[in-house]
Amino acid sequence: RVAAFNMRGCGGLSLMTRRGYSAADVEDLDAALQAAQQRFPKSRLVAAGFSLGANLLVKYLGEKRTATPLVAAASVSNPFTLRVDGVVNSKESFVSMFYSRLLAYKLKAYFREHASVLGLFPGFNEAVREAKTIADIDDRVVPPLLGFKDQRDYYDKT
């Protein structure tokens, strides 16, 4: 059996709550794994995460330690520390800059798609419209939207 985990509002799924996905939030992944274990109690569960999903999987494993139904996991292309590597620091190389802008473009589309459900804060539309890089989004949009003090608080918790 194979199952896929999509973060809140991703993969064509509607966002059903005011809480969007976050690299710092392992609750949904934990709930999905617990549900898979309950539904298929004799199955051995393994997981593979890619990019931000890899970051989430490793964070989940670090928090849950042995209290997880997983017997194995693979982390592929994990950014590990969002504020140190090229994902956020878009000024280091052309590839990093391109990736940062592409990811910001995708996140802006996510925010526009789910704007009616998300708990918008004053200046939300302007912050999203003016964001050019992932660092802009993580500085001006993510903290107030997801309840972090600031960009550093978000990065520290991912």
Image (cartoon, rainbow, N blue to C red):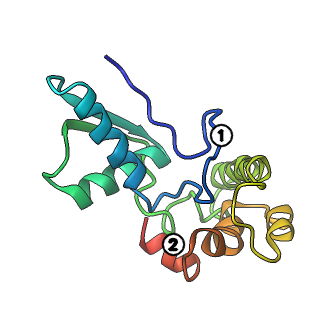
Where is residue 85 drawn, in percent x and y? 50, 61
Type of the residue with mark 2: Tyr
18, 99: nearer the viewer: 18
* Label 1 or label 2, whichever comes before in sequence order: 1
Which residue lies at the image location 64% right of the left edge and 56% below the top edge?
93
Q: Residue pushed farthest bottom?
A: 149
Please identify the quadrant where the N terminus is shown.
top left
- Pointer 2 local density, CA inside 10 Å: few below 14, some 14–19, many at least 20: many
Total marks drawn? 2
Task: Tell me the element at label 1.
Answer: loop
Q: Is residue 14 left or right of residue 33?
A: right
| Residue 109, placed above or below residue 80 | above
Q: In the rendered image, which quarter is residue 111 located in?
A: bottom right
The reply, left or right, for residue 21 in relation to residue 117 is: left
| Residue marked by disc 1 | 14
Q: Is residue 24 or residue 90 the one in the foreground?
A: 24
- Mark 1, mark 2: which one is toward the viewer? 1
Q: Nearer the viewer, residue 59 or 16?
A: 16
Location of mark 2 (residue) = 154
* Marks 1/2: CA–CA distance: 24 Å
The residue located at (24%, 33%) in the rendering is 38
7 versus 127 height, above or below: above
Question: Mark 1 packing: few (<14 Cα in 10 Å), some, or many (20+)?
Answer: few
| Amino acid at circle 1 | Ser
Q: Is residue 64 above or below residue 109?
A: below
